[in-house]
Structures are given as structure tokens and as C-alpha cells.
Image (tube, rainbow, N blue to C red):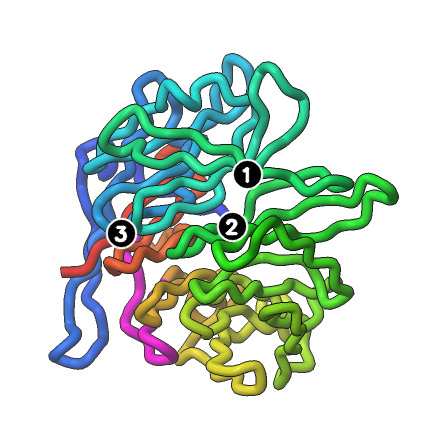
Amino acid sequence: MSRRAAVLTAAALALGTVFTAPATASAAEACTWTAHKVVPPDGYSAQFTSVRGTDSHGNYAGDVVDLRVNMGRVVLWTDGQPRIPDALASFVYPHVADENSAGTVLLSGSLPTSTEVGVYLFSGGHRGPGTLTQLPTPAGYRINSAVALNERGDVLASASAVRDDHAVSILWSDLAAGPIVIDSPAGGGIDLDDDGTVLLNAPDNKLGALWRHGQVIPLTGEDRPVLIRAIRNGVVVGTAIDSWPSSRALAWHGPNDPRQLEQGGTAEAINAHGLIAGSLTNLVGHAAVWQDTRLLGALPAPDGVDADVFVVGDDGTVFGNTGSEYGPLRWTCA
């Protein structure tokens, strides 16, 4: 999901300096955004550390590359302190996809005893050893990667049909007796809303669609190539590409209702309260945040360099990656 790389000044971060920028909201919403360095686990490089999800209660999850074996390790940060859980230390090529407010982490990968990739939920890991649960893969399909986890515990993953290798999505829902295979020409699942709606990403950057209870509902209102990114509380965010690097950040408040974000270049992530993170002006603009379509302000970075946005917590915390040796950043506003 990274849009670009940026470099932070070594001296400032080495001294633990935080960078601040005022938000441009109304007086009732005004606050100051502050960037904090995310600490990697001992013995690992921050440059190869990423945050993928948060419980919105001060804890978050992600992964780090173990350069000794060129393979990822799952990392949990509890109250800002990182650790690699013992229950997940033996995973082969794990991919952390998401985390919900219960502190349950969604990941995919395989155990040393198996060559098959599976989808797993890891719960209770922030305050204890944690419990690992594998979700059943429907017969005739193989898992490619975990994709998204919602608040009620529904899970979305990408998969392939064994018979001809064509791509599908698989949804495990609390409302269904077993996994649901979504096989639609409208695209593959890229995100999952809390009501179980799946956001489909159309091939060739065409406009995507919503999958809801078996019905496909196309998004409309944009004839340019679109990078669809996320959905929350029925609002879809994405980026219309006019010509490199010209682009427009959009939020669909209904399948037929795209709205342009004020001075928005890209829209990458959204939380339950409509806080959107992306970039200003164009595809390579400075990282920023919006409330709905209204610009709140730029996310601070030294000397005009920037970071990519990955995760927006429901507590208003934003996580991103600098693309440099300093790794991920955490932004808070107070």
C-alpha cells in the first residue's frame, strides 16, 4: 500500500524529537498533530517494521522482517512496547492484515508443519500469551492472503480456485454457517465494513463495487482510473487519477455519491468516525487528515518530507511509514 518513500532527518529522530503541526479545524475541533517514532523489537531494524492494525486503545500490531532468514515476524505493541509473541514466532511468511477493537489480530501464513497458507485469528495477545485460531478453508480453494477483519469478527481473505487458479474472495461471517466464496467479475475483496459489506476492487483500476448479502452494487460517478482503498460505516474512500501525478481524493457517501476531499490528492484509510488519512494535492503530496471531506490539517514531518498512511484508529491515532531507516510513525492529536 506504500505510495512513496521519504527520509526523516537522522539527528531529530535519534534525539527522540517529535514533530508537530496545528490542525486547521474549527475551534471546537482544533488540536495539534504530533509524530512519534514507533519502536521496533530489540534486534530488529525499524526500516523493515510496519504497523498494520490497531485496537484503538493504545495497542497495535504489525510485522518486521527478520533479515537472518528473510522472513517476516509478527509484532504486537502493548502500550507502545513491542514483542514477538511466542505463539506466532514459528509462523512461516506471516502477513498481518488487521486488528479490531477487541485486540484480535488477523493474519495469514503457514506453520512449520504445513505448506498450506491459512487464515488465523490471534486473540488476547496484548495482555497474555494469546490464543491462535485457524479459520476453515472451503474445499476446492487455497488461501492467498488475509485481507480485513471487522468489529463483529467477520474476516475477509483473498483466495484462488484450485481447478483453474482464478481469483476469488472468501468471507467468514458470524451470520453464516460456513465460509462464503465471493466470485464476481466486479473484482476481488479489498476491505470489509462492520455490517459485513465487502468492498470490491475492480480490475484495471476501474471503479469498484460493494458486495452485500450476495448482491453486487457498483460504485458510480467517476470515469477516471480509480484506486479504491477502504470502507467504513458505508463510506468508501479512494483516489481518482487524472494524469501523473495529478489526482483527486474522493469519499463515496453512497454508491452514486462521490465527494471530493478539500485539497485532497489521495485517500488511503478511514475510521468509524469519518476521519480520513491520505495526501494533499496529488499522488505524491504531503500526508494529511480530513473529517469527512473537510481538511483538518497536514501530518507533521521535518523539512517537508513525508510518510505514507496505512492505518487510522477509531481513537483518532494515525499510523504510517516513512519509507526510511526510521520505519513507522504514530500520529496523535491533542
Q: Amino acid at mark 1?
A: Leu
Q: Amino acid at mark 2?
A: Val
Q: Amino acid at mark 3?
A: Ser
Res. 207 image quadrant: bottom right
Image position of 228 (left or right of 268): right
On the rendered image, what quadrant is the C terminus found in? bottom left
- Residue labelled with disc 3: 56
Cα separation, mark 2 vs mark 3, equals 18 Å
Q: Nearer the viewer, mark 1 or mark 3?
A: 1
Marks 2 and 3 in Cβ contact (< 8 Å): no
Element marked by disc 1 = strand
- Residue labelled with disc 1: 135
- Determine crowd level at label 2: few under 14, some 14-19, many 20+ residues with C-alpha closer than 10 A: many
Identify which residue, 30 or 217, lies in the foreground: 217
Q: Nearer the viewer, mark 2 or mark 1?
A: 1
Q: Could you say where residue 286 lies in the image, as x and y percent from the top left?
A: 40, 61
Marks 2 and 1 in Cβ contact (< 8 Å): yes
Element marked by disc 2 = strand
In the image, residue 110 above or below residue 228 = above
Q: Could you say where residue 235 lies in the image, as x and y percent from the top left?
A: 45, 74
- Determine crowd level at label 1: few under 14, some 14-19, many 20+ residues with C-alpha closer than 10 A: some
